[in-house]
Amino acid sequence: MEFDTITAISTPMGEGAIAIVRLSGEQAIDITNKIFVGVGGKKLEDAASHTIHYGKIIDPATGDVIEEVMISVMKAPKTFTRENIVEINCHGGLVSVNRVLQLVLRHGARLAEPGEFTKRAFLNGRIDLSQAEAVMDLIRAKTDRAMNVALGQMEGRLSNLIKKFRQEILEVVAHVEVNIDYPEYDDVEEMSHKMLSEKAKYIRDELKKLLQTAQQGKILREGLSTAIVGRPNVGKSSLLNSLVQENKAIVTDIPGTTRDVIEEYVNVRGVPLRLVDTAGIRETEDIVERIGVERSRKVLNEADLILLVLNYADDLTKEDEQLFEAVNGMDVIVIINKTDLPQKINLEKVNELAAGHKVITTSLLEEKGIDDLEESISLMYFQGTIEASDMTYISNSRHIALIGQALDAIEEVLNGIDMGTPIDIIQIDLTRTWELLGEIIGDTVQESLINQLFSQFCLGK
C-alpha cells in the first residue's frame, strides 16, 4: 500500500529546547533534501538508516537560512510507519518550527491528519488496532501503573490473547466445515456437540476472566471520577490540597468560599483520581454560589466515588443527612474532618447513616488520616494491589463492548448445544464470536470506524 508523504509538528507547541517536524512517506527523504544543506554537502539519500545529521534548513527560493537543525533519517521498512521517516530537530519555539513546517509543506508534503502516523503503522501492518489505541493510552496515562498497562497492550499482550482465542475458534469452525463438506473422510474425527461444548465453555470462561478486569482497567485508563462533597467549611478544599499536595483550592474559614467546581488529577497508590472539589451544597441566596451548588449536584450524579466530608466539631445537620440520602447507592467514603477540635458530632449516628460505608477520621490541619483514606480507596477498587505488570487488562470502552458481545455470542452457542441444534447452525454464532474478537485487533473492522478512532489522536502522532 502506497501513500503520499505527510508531515506535522510532533512536539507540544510553545517554548522548549527542541521541537520536531516529522515526515513519513516515500518522498520524505527527497523532500527534506530539497531544503537541507548538510556539513560537506552530504545528501540525505546517501545516509545510512537510523543516523542523525547536522546542517541547516535553507529556503531554496531566497537562499535564506531558516534554521540550524539535526536531522534523523530512518528508512523503510524498519520504522514506526514502515515508510521512510525524517525527523527535523529544530530549536524549540513557535516561529522557528512553523517556518520549517511551512517550507516542508511547500516542497511536496501534506499536513498529517490527527493520528495519521499511527494509522499508517496500522494500515501497513506494523501494529494491530488494539496496539494503535494503546499509543494514545500511553500518552494520556496519569500513573505509572496506567502506563504499564498501556505498554503491555502496545507490546501485544491483549492482541496476542485475542489472536489465541480466535485461532481456537477458527480450528473448531474449520473442523465443522470439513465434516459438512467432506463427510466421506473417515480419518477426520466428527465434531460432536460434546466436543463443541467443551471448546465453547473454555472460550466463554476465558472471555469472562478478561471482562472481569474491565472495571480496574478502565479506572487505570480514564481515572476514577471522584467528587468531594459536604456542607460549606467542612474541609473539602483542604482535602483536595492534601491529596494533590499543592494549594490548588482557596482555604478560608468563610463558608461558601468555593464558588465553582475545581478539578485535578491525583495519583493515589497507582489509582488515578479525577478529583473534583465542589461548592458546598446548601440553600443560598447568593446567585453565584447557587450556580456553583447546582454544578456540584451535577458532578455528584456523574461521579464514580464520593468523598463525603463532615465536621467533627459540629453537630450533624439536616443538610448532612440530605447529603447521605443523595449519595445512597453510590461508592462512598465518609470523612470526619477537624478531629483536632472538640467533638460535637454524633459518631453513632454517622455510622448509622453511612450504612456500612467506610468511615475515616482526619485532621487535615495536622495532616492526619490521609494515609488511611488512600489505603481505603486502593482497597475499594483494587484490593490494595494492582498487578499491572503481569496481567492483561482491558480498559478501552470499545474493547469492553466487543468482548461483551462476543460473550453473548458464545452463550448462544452453548444454548444451541443444550437445545440440540444442528452443529452447522450453531457454527453461525461461533463465527460471529470470531468476527467480534477480530474487530478488537482490526481484522474485521470497517474503514469508517478506523477513521473515527484515529481522529481522536493528537496531531503529529
Image (cartoon, helix red, strand yellow):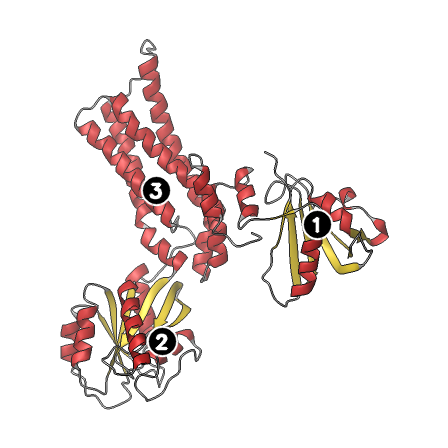
Q: Residues within 10 Å of mark 2 (few under 14, many from 20)?
A: many
Q: In this orientation, which residue lies closer to the viewer: 372 or 394?
A: 394
Report the disc number at residue 106.
1
**Residue placed at 29% from the left, 88% from the top?**
340
On the image, numbered disc 3 is attached to which residue?
A: 402
- Compared across the picture, whether 360 is left or right of 447 comes to left
- Give the amino acid at mark 1: Arg
Label total for image: 3
Give how far apart the Cα atoms at labels 2 and 3 are.
38 Å
Q: Which element is circle 2 on? A: loop
Q: Kindly indicate the quadrant of the structure image that contains residue 347.
A: bottom left
On screen, residue 40 above or below 269:
above
On the image, numbered disc 2 is attached to which residue?
A: 260
Residue extending farthest bottom: 342
**Residue placed at 73% from the left, 56% from the top?**
70
Q: Residues within 10 Å of mark 3 (few under 14, many from 20)?
A: some
- Residue 384 in the image: state x and y as whole percent: 33, 62
Considering the image in quadrants, where does the N terminus appear?
top right
- Residue 422 in the image: state x and y as whole percent: 22, 21
Q: Kindly indicate the quadrant of the structure image that contains residue 248.
A: bottom left
Q: Residues within 10 Å of mark 1 (few under 14, many from 20)?
A: few
